[in-house]
Amino acid sequence: MPLLTLDGLSLAFGLQPLLDQASLAIEPGERVCLLGRNGEGKSTLLKIVSGEVGPDAGTVRLEEGAVLAVLPQNLPADETRTAYEIVASAFPETGELLTRFHTLSQQADEQSLDEMMKVQERLEALDGWRLDQKVTAILAQYRIDPERRLNTLSGGWQRRVLLARALVSDPDMLLLDEPTNHLDVPAIAWLEEALVQFSGALLFVSHDRAFIRRMATRIVELDRGHLISFASNYDKYLELKEKALEEEERQNALFDKRLKQEEAWIRQGVKARRTRNMGRVRALRAMREERLQRRERGGTANFAVEDAARSGRLVVEAKEAGFTYPDGNQVIRELNLTVMRGDKIGLVGENGTGKTTLVRLMLGDLTPTEGTVRLGTNREVAYFDQLRGELDLSRNALDNLSEGREFIDINGQQKHVLGYLQEFLFSPERARSPVSVFSGGERARLLLAKLFSKPANILVLDEPTNDLDVETLELLESQLVSFQGTVIVISHDREFLDNVVTDTLFLDGSGAVHSYVGGYTDWRRQGGSFPSEQKVSKQAGKKTRPPASLAPQKQQKPEPVKPKSVKLSYKLKLELEQLPGRIEKLESLVADQRAEVSNPDFYNRPAGEVTLVLDELAKNEATLEATIERWMELEEQGNE
């Protein structure tokens, strides 16, 4: 019996319905990936399944007694509750009581004790202590500090807390909308492992092809209001989809040819009219209606990069270059790098390792504090911002792009702004809509349109794949590969890097930059690994630590173990005794800095100040990790 059944769902917000008699059944244990173009209604469908949005027609049936949970796409903007409070909120009444009990337990007045007794009685009636044990257990399983406030956690850890909240209720089905956005590769790997171990059914939206290949047991496509199921993995789906489109085109061509013949027959001369077959006339009317109701598949985005005059053969050359902020935070050290015209460079590293600082050095926005960085000549740079900061949300797409122009020059040809936007799949009506109502994918397409409307011979793209559908991704890949200029890409999309870049620069978090030939897979094949993976490997059989990109804001303070004097020298014993204090100070410093960068007003500061704080935070995080590693190393020696 299906766990979830969608029967005849219909929903329309405009002229064309998002859902048109759409139906689907999902069995227990399936992992179903929902694919479709940007704007087709994938997120809306998930909201219908969760009950957040109601359909115009049709039914949603979840097996009786089954539990549904949701991992939201967007992280909370300024959530001040603790991890314990958020996970406990999965049980609405009980969660509130447990939170209240914990708050009252920290107070000592008589009134608080009286209220605690009432709360305790209600918790016992609701079997609340069992649920408290479940909350505590899953926080421990995911290595989450229950007292950490969500707005002081990194993006990866926030998503980990939200996943814990979704799974603490033992759901039978989990809904996920773009779960890998803004996560680095180690965080994505952790998420994949956590979801693989989940025994319930998954329905998820994603455009990360490597993630889909790992997770999906079935592909369902939302296309022109209908749900089409492909009982296959992602690669087989691509083959089946191509064949299905070819067959659809063939059938449509045969239908149109027959309709044209019938239209010619009905318009014959007077003699034909006297002998007209009325049954044939009625059949023609039915064919006209069928053709009128046909929804054509939307066009494919068709854009190109406007080439500027060629840059000099040398784009940038660094010799023993480094960059240290005034506070002593060294982000880049001993950089030796040569980038030539036409190179496609991918930057890989965990969040906070200095990728943006490296790009700014390569572009000349920062001057190295040691060594030299020599810039080439005739450089025209176009920058794709992952935060979409170049878009004015209060203006429409047309105004964002045109900047007062009616026509723009693209590779020597004048194009009307509306016509140019149609190449990026914006209809005239959509082009006049405010950007604030656009989906993430539409905003990304608009930013690409703005980026590619200006001449450039150096393209810098910071996380360009977030929110883009697969077709647009593939077109972007082909354009970047054929682009005659230089491309610098910061991305955590493993397949995108494999398909585009010719060289990979890996930032290990210590300031060192390592160069590898090829893309992400080639880097892996040449022995590349993230620092967090190396730490886990070292500690196999011992207490493992989470990836640095997912590190909580305050590490658990290690309890010092008195070393055996016969194994450690006096100097090492003294170092071991001092390490816990140093760790505590670093924890406090990192927690304060993360609280600072989590403030919504932080990114309103000048760009240089923002970068300075972020790079200082990255340095302190790396120092904290290294200090804990040193403590564990000395502790092990002392116990041998």
Image (cartoon, rainbow, N blue to C red):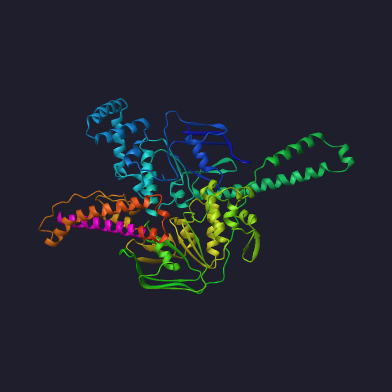
Highlighted range, magenta:
614-640
Position of the C terminus by quadrant:
bottom left
Residue 141: x %, y % from top left: 30, 43
Give x and y (percent) for residue 44. 52, 40
Direction left: furthest residue: 566
Where 519 falls versus 375 (above or below)? above
Farthest-out residue, right: 271
Give the total of numbered labels.
0
Q: Please tell me in which quadrant of the rendered image residue 99 appears.
A: top left
Query: Looking at the image, can residue 168 be seen?
Result: yes
Against 281, residue 180 (above or below) is: below
Give how far across and how far down residue 365 sits, in percent.
43, 66
Position above or below: 323 against 215: below
Which residue sits at x=52%, y=52%? 468
Give the image quarter of residue 171.
top left
Tell me which secondary structure the magenta stretch mostly adopts. Answer: helix
In-front residue for pair 131/31: 131
The reply to whether the magenta stretch includes residue 636 is: yes
526 sits left or right of 22 in the view: left
Which of these two is toward me, 374 or 51?
A: 374
Q: Which residue is drawn at 78% across and 45% down?
A: 261
Q: Residue 424 at what x, y percent from top left?
A: 59, 54
State yes or no: residue 599 in magenta.
Answer: no
* Residue situated in front as seen by the camera: 167 or 537: 167
Q: Is 471 located above or below residue 274 in the figure?
A: below
Q: Is residue 66 left or right of residue 627?
A: right
| Residue 569 visible to an observer of this rendering | no
Question: Which image quarter: residue 583?
Answer: bottom left
